[in-house]
Amino acid sequence: MAGQLIVFEGIEGAGKTTQLQRAAAWLRSQVAVPVLTTREPGGTLLGQELRHLLLKVRDTDEIAPRSELLLYASDRAQHVEQYLKPNLAQGAIILCDRYTDSTLAYQGYGRQLDLELIRQLNAIATGGLTPNLTFWLDLDPEIGLQRITERGAPNRLEQEALDFHQRVRAGYMALAQNHPQRIIHLDAIAAADDLEREIRAILQTRLSEKLCESFPKKLSKN
Ligand code: T5A
């Protein structure tokens, strides 16, 4: 059977990676199919090189917005072809840190590039592969950036001005309104343990509906 692609989205420091790792650990104890974690940019060897180019702070030679857009699309095309599609075909549950909504939010709303153009580019890069479920960890950018600053030196995107990050958040809001079935809004100011419980409960419902007949292990209630 086909697997499930579950994506974690949100602004910098929203807690995506933290929750993705916790959800993966829990799912591994619940289901009998492989549970994989990956990210964009950087989910393949080529992607790791593109990630370095995209995120390193540049003193000169700034990346132009359309060039940035194409680099993210290139990372995604490689990721879909080389990693996501083959593993989904094997029935894996894949938890992915960022996917197509990041490009709409950051390059579309943040950089203000044409949204229709980005949708077309996303369609080319993914070959039509859309997430089964997306968790949007929604947080005030001032708080997210504060969390990042406490962690260490910010990367190229994290160094953008506050109004850029506010546009990105507004972008996620618009996307969630347009895709209420797929995108689940989570208030990311909550404690990590509370968010983890909320995510487990949603996964429990969504995956039970779709997958329980195929799983030797049963999804438990906690
Ligand atoms: N990008 C990406 C685009 O512009 N276009 C695209 O198409 C794509 C795919 C990727 C950058 O690329 C951009 C977006 C990004 O700018 P990245 O390093 O992968 O760069 O950046 P992020 O995905 O944003 O990763 P971060 O690590 O910065 O944020 P996370 O994963 O949301 O946060 P996390 O879990 O690492 O936590 C951050 C800190 O907060 C604490 C953690 O302990 C950690 O210190 N924390 C909490 N604190 C309080 N309460 C909670 N609930 C907390 N949860 C975590």
Image (tube, rainbow, N blue to C red):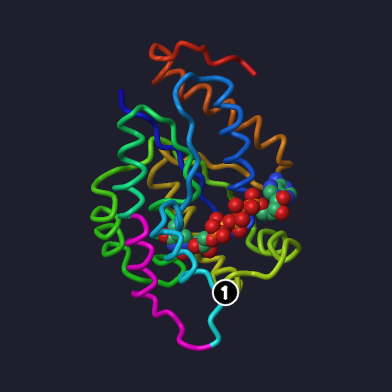
Hey, which quadrant is residue 66 in on the image? bottom left
Q: Is residue 14 visible?
A: no
Q: Residues within 10 Å of mark 1 (few under 14, many from 20)?
A: few
Task: Kindly identify the residue that appears in the image at 32 percent across and 63 percent down.
Answer: 115
Does the beta carbon of the residue at mark 1 sit less than 8 Å from ligand 1?
no
205 or 154: nearer the eye? 154
Let me know if residue 120 is in the magenta part: no
Considering only vertical position in the picture, is 186 above or below 33? below
- Picture coordinates of residue 8 (x, y %)? 51, 45
The residue sitting at the right extreme is 150
- Picture coordinates of residue 82 (x, y %)? 32, 47
140 or 217: nearer the eye? 217
- In what quadrant does ligand 1 lie? bottom right
- Picture coordinates of residue 153 (x, y %)? 68, 70
Q: Quadrant of the C terminus?
A: top right
Q: Which residue is mark 1?
A: 160
Task: Inspect the image, locate mark 1, and give the three-letter code of the amino acid beneath it.
Answer: Glu
Magenta region, residue range? 60-76
Main SS, magenta residues = helix
